[in-house]
Image: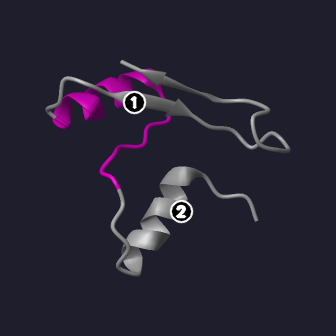
């Protein structure tokens, strides 16, 4: 089964696990709008795709 991190966080929350707050977006405009609503000065941007194994694609950027 392939699920993204945001999907896993929803499942964990549903069963009472504590998970960090965050937003999910499918495009840059949506991401900017949602990130502004977080009201924080630091962000961690994480891009994910299913590409056949760990570290094959995606990335993390601290802003």
Residue 16: percent from left, percent from top: 35, 79
Please identify the quadrant where the N terminus is shown. bottom right
- 61 sits to left or right of 18: right
Give the residue at mark 2: 8
Identified at 20% across, 37% down, the residue is 38
Q: How far apart are marks 2 and 1 (CA)?
A: 18 Å
Is residue 21 part of the magenta span, yes or no? yes
Q: Which residue is drawn at 69% across and 38% down?
A: 49
Residue at which label 1 appears: 44
Q: Is residue 29 left or right of residue 6?
A: left
Quarter of image, res 28: top left
Residues under numbered marks 2 and 1 in contact, where contact means CB atoms less than 8 Å apart = no
Question: Within 10 angstroms of label 2, few (less than 14), some, or many (20 or more) residues?
Answer: few
Seen in the image, is 20 located left or right of residue 27? left
Give coordinates of residue 24: x percent, y percent.
Answer: 42, 43
Image quadrant in which the C terminus is located: top left
Tell me: residue 58, above or below residue 15.
above
Extreme-left residue of the structure:
39
Q: The residue tagged with tag 1: helix, strand or loop?
A: strand
């Amino acid at each position: 089964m392939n699920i993204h991190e945001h999907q896993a966080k929803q499942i964990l929350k549903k069963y009472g696990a504590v998970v960090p707050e965050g937003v999910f977006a499918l495009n840059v405009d949506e991401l900017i709008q949602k990130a502004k609503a977080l009201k924080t000065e630091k962000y961690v941007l994480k891009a994910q795709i299913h590409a056949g194994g760990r570290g094959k694609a995606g990335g993390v950027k601290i802003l």
